[in-house]
Amino acid sequence: MTTNDERRTTNNARSSARGFTLLFASLVASLLLAVGITIFDITLKEIILASAARDSTYAIYTADTGIECAFYWDFKNGGASGSAFATSSASSQAATITCNNQTINLTAAPNSVVKTSSAATTTFSLTMTPKSYCATVTVAKWGNPTNTTIVSHGYNTCDVNDPHRIERALQANY
């Protein structure tokens, strides 16, 4: 037979074991929650980094498309008929070109690419579809023999107010 003292000692041991089990379970749950939150935070940062890299790629490819369009129209008409772009600051060549299935009217721009008063500067913009990627291309020609500088700025979005807008630029001199 067990005495009342023995029963109390056994109940106290069980009660203390239950308290330890509850404490241990809380500790393990807290540790797993901390690990889960850390993994979620790392994953979120990786997603943000990957989307920035993707948008940067879109911007650089858009700039490359713009500069290739300028190369095509400069070299296509570079024979006897001359360039599609103005070749002197006095010329006001009103030409149209077609790139990416868009008819583009060429316009004169301020001499922002080449800092010389004799430079003929032409600018045009492209919009890539189905997404809204944009490129702004400036072609400057000056000197004899003719020197050419083409600067193409590509954007991952045409929305100038988008806080995630990324710009990449390419320049060619020949």
Image: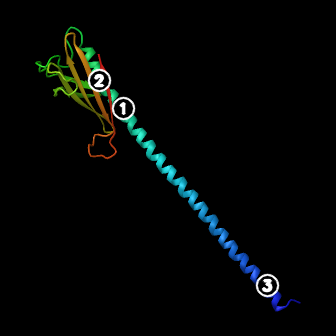
Reading the image, the residue beneath label 2 is 69
- Helix or strand or loop: what does disc 1 sit on? helix
**Which residue in the protein does label 3 denote?**
9
Residue 143 picture quarter: top left
Q: CA distance from mark 2 to mark 3?
A: 90 Å
Q: Is residue 62 above or below residue 47?
A: above
Count neighbours of disc 3 (C-alpha within 10 A) and say few if under 14, some if 14 to 19, many if 20 or more.
Answer: few
Residue that numbered label 1 is attached to: 60
- Measured as percent of width and height from the top left, residue 111 is found at 17, 26
Residue at 61% over, 61% down:
31
Q: Is residue 54 left or right of residue 102?
A: right
User: Which residue type carries mark 1?
Assistant: Ile
Q: Residue at x 33, y 31 (%)?
A: 62
Residue farthest toward the bottom in the current orientation of the protein:
4
Give the alpha-carbon distance from disc 2 to disc 1, as whole Å. 14 Å
Question: How far across and down, in percent of the image, does residue 141 sit?
Answer: 21, 18
Q: Amino acid at mark 3?
A: Thr
Q: Quadrant of the N terminus?
A: bottom right
In which quarter of the view is residue 74 placed? top left
Front residue of 78 and 129 = 78
Say if 108 sits above or below 133 in the image: above
Discs 2, 3 touching: Cβ within 8 Å:
no
Residue count near mark 1 (Cα–Cα under 10 Å), binned few <14, some 14–19, many ≥20: many
Between disc 2 and disc 1, the foreground one is 1
